[in-house]
Amino acid sequence: MKASPQLRRAWRPGLAPSQQRGVLLLEALIAILIFSLGILGVVGLQAASIKQATAAEDRAKAASLANDLISRMWASNHTTLSTNFGATGDGFTRWMETVEGSQLPGVKDSDTLKPTISFTDGPTSATGIALSTQAKIIIKWQAPNESTAHQYTAIAVIK
């Protein structure tokens, strides 16, 4: 007795061709889904790295601005330091023009984010003149998409 052709086909491993329809399409769709999730993850990482790079750039700008002001203070007359670089002083006004031109976010638009400088006199000489002055510079900024402000503080002793 010969085996019927149907028995020979059923003996093969796996499913019959009529039962496998659409499996390749399903595998392709699952592969596309996995690939899409991977691409979304890479895009998310790229967005986070851009945000961190922007924050680092803002911190570097603030540090550069503070160092610029300290350099101006060192080059100025020590006896008129607190007058010249106080909130209404000529040196502070010129430096604020540099700050506003630096494109540090939020500094130009908000009074609460304006830089501040405070002075503390150090030891005095026999004539009562301060031998050194400590300057504390606080620079604040706020990125457009953030709710809290950032702050950079620099302290320098000017002799």
Image (cartoon, grey):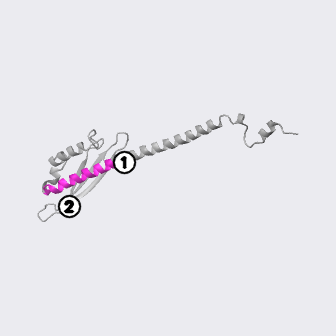
Whether residues under marks 2 and 1 lie with C-beta atoms below 8 angstroms apart, the answer is: no
Which image quarter is the N terminus in?
top right
Residue 14 figure quarter = top right
Image quarter in which the C terminus is found: bottom left
Nearer to me, 42 or 98:
42
In-image side of 89 versus 2 (left or right): left
Q: Which mark is residue 53?
A: 1
Q: Position of residue 57 (x, y in %)?
A: 32, 48
Q: Which percent across, then down, holds residue 99?
A: 23, 45
Q: Earlier in the sequence, mark 2 or mark 1?
A: 1
Q: Nearer the viewer, residue 104 or 28?
A: 28
Classify 119 as above or below 93.
Answer: below
**Main secondary structure of the magenta stretch:** helix
Determine whether the residue tagged by mark 1 lies in a helix, strand or loop.
helix
Measuring 67% from the left and 34% from the top, which residue is drawn there? 21
Kindly identify the amino acid type of the residue bearing the numbered disc 1. Ala
Q: Helix, strand or loop at disc 2?
A: loop
Identify the residue shown where x is 25% and y is 44%. Answer: 102
* Magenta stretch, residue numbers: 55-78
Q: Residues within 10 Å of mark 2 (few under 14, many from 20)?
A: some
Question: Farthest right residue?
Answer: 1
User: Disc 2 marks which residue?
Assistant: 122
Return the x and y of residue 142 as percentages of the image width and height: 33, 43
Residue 47 lies left or right of residue 2; in this view the side is left
Residue 153 location in percent, x, y?
29, 53
The three-letter amino acid code for the residue at tag 2 is Gly
The alpha-carbon separation of the residues under discs 2 and 1 comes to: 39 Å
Q: Is residue 148 magenta?
A: no
Q: How many marks?
A: 2
Would you call the spot at circle 1 few (<14 residues within 10 Å), some (14-19), or many (20 or more)? few
